[in-house]
Amino acid sequence: MSETAASVASAASATSRTVVAESATTRGRRARIALRALQVLLALFYGLASALPKLIAHPSAVESFDKIGWGSGAMYTIGALELAGGIALLVPLLQSVAATALSALMVGAFVVQMTAFHGENAATPLILIIPLALIAWARRGQNAELLRVVRRRA
């Protein structure tokens, strides 16, 4: 009787370990999918909502850059950087670097919002830094591979 009870307890323990392992795998898969969805949403935001108005010289973008005193050259440059960053968020080898670069761009946007626009939309760049930092940290493993590729080509 005690051998049977021990056998059942051992089988139950193995089953619970399997369930925990499957649960961790499922959780990891769901986290990767959620992170990828976040990257796609941010890429769409940077490409369409942020870069496009600058690149087509939408009147609101032109007015903002005139108010800062930077002119159209800076507007097109920042629009191109945002578009490049949005695209790079979708390239596996560039994801972490792109998120870091876009975070730096958002720090600059925050400073401009605070100084030139008196904090009018200062929360937006700060809010965007949070998911960008998460992506940069979660995809940091790609940085070593990117460095290998760059060194190989140099």
Image: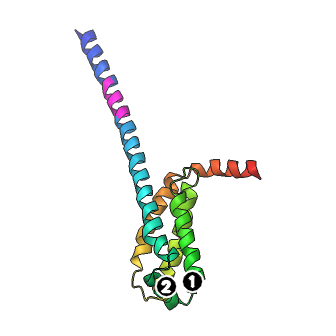
Rendered residue at 54%/50% (across/down) = 92
Q: Which of the 4 image quarters holds residue 42?
A: bottom left
**Secondary structure category for the residue under label 1:** helix
- Position of residue 59 measured from the top left corner of the image (x, y, whole percent): 44, 84
Residue at 45 percent of width and 72 percent of height: 50
Look at 46% across and 75% down and name the residue there.
53
Question: Which of 122 and 8 lies nearest the eye of the viewer?
Answer: 122
Query: Which residue of the protein is positioned furthest toward the right in this rendering?
Result: 154
Residue type indicated by callout 1:
Ser
Q: Does the magenta stretch include residue 136?
A: no
Q: What stretch is highlighted in magenta?
A: 15-22
Q: What residue type is labelled 2?
A: Val
Q: Residue at x 55, y 58 (%)?
A: 88
State the quadrant of the N terminus. Answer: top left
Residue 24 higher or lower than 40, as above or below: above
Instruction: Say if mark 2 contacts mark 1, CB within 8 Å.
Output: yes
**Residue receiving disc 2:** 62
In the displayed orientation, state which residue is furthest to the front.
Answer: 56
Percent across and percent down for residue 86 are 50, 62
Q: Distance of mark 2 from mark 1, alpha carbons? A: 7 Å
Q: Which mark identifies residue 72?
A: 1
Q: Nearer the viewer, residue 154 or 79?
A: 79
Q: Which mark is residue 83?
A: none
Give the structural element (helix, strand or loop) at label 2. Answer: helix
